[in-house]
């Protein structure tokens, strides 16, 4: 009789070509890879220098997302010369190596971690690697995704394999009903605050519990996406009927008899009843309040009703030093209420929170209202298809009437690699995944929160509790 196994063990074992040593290193077969214009150039240059071809070109999907302009009127290449060079070299590489490309003008273009699921390119049970740490997003579909470096991209394209070190396992169980206006973003931010930015280093996290089961696939993606901010190199959830219904009509999902065969296989993707995890974490959903960051790391967070912490309250000297530096950078004083801190910008977008479900939540908050004077609001949908759907549903009109800029899809101000860059001293309420120093521009102060919370801050002109706006 087999020893009970976690889903992580099942996924990794089923893709192990061979074991390389007794320290957990294996040669891992990768089913799919997603490429972007920013992290791939050196990999392609290496392939060219070695005169190597791709092992399986049809397992790759390429998208332009990091450096492209998101100006409301779509342009083929943005104003940045370096970005144009990357986009053009990417197109040449895709053509020369036989890789399908969703370029800037493609109606399916968008952020890779939004585009790949909406196309049905990622399926349960798959192993997926990409040159972006938020590849963990695909765990929401019952796949196992993780980010890799440029040299690994080259190796993957040439061999369809990677040298991989097995991770320890952590189970995060979330039970109970979420309160009014509490979202999956609040759930994952509470986890990061609870275990710390390095709390899951060396682990793959399995999320489960009644709260997770009640979530949409899009909400689950937000959780798996941001698990990397706790140090996890993998995050996943067992697939269920919610996932199957999401995938069934996607363009690249199996059809007919192949769908039935796939479904039969997918239904075996779960953690065995008596499987043992290396670490267990539990969260009571009912206890979660709207979350917001006050510092320069995703774990430097608080409930919106809290106050800016005092570094002197930290017993740990390293943590005290980190808090002091964060408050200096953020221009905040210990003890002041977080609610009421003025903002200059509100940004809704990124691979964490720019899907249609997120935009519907934003529209619910801002409908019939106006952005506060002195605040610049930007909404950047996660893909061109999301943008088109938002326009059909009338969401775009709501955003524009409220005073938001309704822009084209791309990574945009999540990491400010295009012309969407803020100025020193700007303070931004943001639905993105990272609030590091300089992430949205040199000297820019970023507060992470859910899209609904960003929308509320934009309307009020300061950090606030979305529940105070009387949204049902």
Image (cartoon, rainbow, N blue to C red):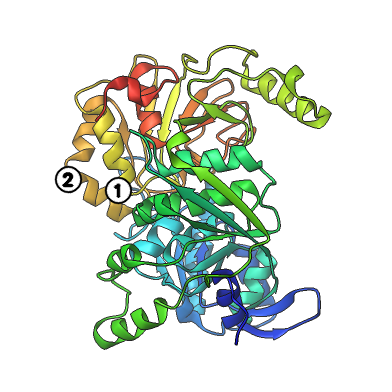
Measuring from the top left, give residue 467's x and y in whole percent. Answer: 34, 25
Within 10 angstroms of label 2, few (less than 14), some, or many (20 or more) residues? Answer: few
Give left or right: position of 224 versus 71. Answer: right
Q: Is residue 116 above or below residue 396?
A: below
Q: Mark 2 or 1 closer to N-term?
A: 1
Q: Is residue 308 above or below residue 400?
A: above
Q: Nearer the viewer, residue 86 or 437?
A: 437
Measuring from the top left, give residue 61's x and y in whole percent. Answer: 45, 70
Q: Could you tell me if residue 244 is visible in this image?
A: yes
Residue of label 2: 393
Give left or right: position of 443 versus 389. Answer: right
At x 62% / y 47%, what residue is drawn?
Answer: 230
Give left or right: position of 119 versus 205. Answer: left
Q: Is residue 321 above or below residue 391?
A: above
At x 37% / y 67%, what residue is drawn?
Answer: 240
Measuring from the top left, give residue 2's x and y in whole percent. Answer: 60, 84
Give left or right: position of 334 versus 462. Answer: right
Within 10 angstroms of label 1, few (less than 14), some, or many (20 or more) residues? Answer: many
Asked whether the beta carbons under mark 2 and mark 1 sit within 8 Å of each other, the answer is: yes
Which element is circle 2 on? loop
Q: Nearer the viewer, residue 446 or 103?
A: 446
Which element is circle 1 on? helix
Of the 4 image quadrants, the one containing the N terminus is: bottom right
Measuring from the top left, give residue 226's x and y in whole percent. Answer: 53, 48
Q: Nearer the viewer, residue 139 or 432?
A: 139
Which disc number belongs to residue 356?
A: 1
Q: Could you tell me if residue 103 is visible in this image?
A: no
Of the 4 image quadrants, the one containing the C terminus is: top left
Which disc number belongs to residue 165?
A: none
Q: CA distance from mark 2 to mark 1?
A: 10 Å
């Amino acid at each position: 009789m087999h020893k009970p196994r976690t889903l992580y063990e099942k996924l990794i074992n089923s893709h192990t070509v061979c074991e390389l040593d007794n320290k957990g290193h294996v040669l891992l077969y990768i089913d799919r890879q997603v490429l972007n214009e920013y992290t791939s150039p050196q990999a392609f240059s290496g392939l060219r220098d070695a005169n190597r071809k791709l092992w399986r070109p049809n397992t790759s999907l390429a998208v332009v997302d990091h450096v492209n302009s998101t100006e409301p009127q779509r342009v083929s290449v943005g104003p940045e010369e370096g970005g144009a060079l990357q986009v053009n070299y990417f197109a040449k590489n895709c053509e020369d190596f036989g890789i399908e490309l969703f370029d800037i003008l493609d109606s399916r273009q968008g952020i890779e971690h939004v585009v790949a699921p909406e196309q049905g390119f990622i399926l349960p049970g798959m192993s997926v690697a990409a040159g972006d740490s938020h590849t963990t997003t695909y765990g929401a579909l019952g796949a196992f995704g993780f980010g890799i470096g440029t040299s690994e991209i080259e190796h993957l394209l040439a061999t369809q394999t990677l040298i991989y070190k097995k991770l320890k396992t952590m189970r995060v169980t979330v039970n109970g009903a979420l309160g009014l206006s509490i979202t999956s973003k609040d759930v994952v931010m509470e986890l990061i605050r609870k275990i710390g930015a390095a709390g899951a280093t060396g682990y793959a996290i399995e999320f489960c519990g009644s709260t997770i089961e009640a979530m949409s696939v899009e909400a689950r993606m937000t959780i798996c996406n941001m698990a990397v901010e706790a140090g996890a190199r993998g995050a996943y959830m067992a697939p269920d009927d919610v996932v199957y219904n999401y995938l069934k009509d996607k363009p690249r999902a199996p059809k007919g008899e192949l769908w039935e065969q796939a479904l039969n296989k997918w239904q075996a993707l779960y953690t065995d009843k008596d499987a043992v995890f290396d670490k267990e974490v539990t969260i009571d959903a009912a206890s979660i309040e709207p979350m917001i960051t006050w510092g320069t790391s995703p774990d430097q967070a608080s409930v919106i009703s809290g106050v800016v912490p005092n570094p002197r309250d930290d017993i740990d000297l390293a943590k005290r030093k980190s808090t002091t530096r964060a408050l200096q950078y953020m221009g905040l004083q210990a003890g002041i209420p977080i609610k009421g801190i003025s903002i200059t910008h509100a940004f809704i977008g990124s691979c964490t929170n720019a899907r249609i479900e997120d935009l519907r939540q934003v529209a619910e908050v801002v409908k019939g209202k106006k952005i506060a004077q002195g605040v610049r609001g930007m909404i950047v949908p996660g893909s061109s298809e999301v943008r088109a759907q938002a326009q059909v549903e009338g969401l775009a009109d709501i955003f524009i009437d409220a005073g938001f800029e309704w822009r084209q899809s791309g990574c945009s101000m999540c990491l400010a690699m295009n012309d969407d860059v803020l100025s020193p001293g700007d303070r931004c309420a943001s639905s993105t995944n990272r609030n590091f120093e300089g992430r949205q521009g040199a000297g820019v102060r970023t507060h992470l929160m859910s899209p609904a919370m960003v929308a509320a801050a934009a309307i009020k002109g300061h950090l606030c509790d979305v529940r105070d706006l009387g949204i049902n």
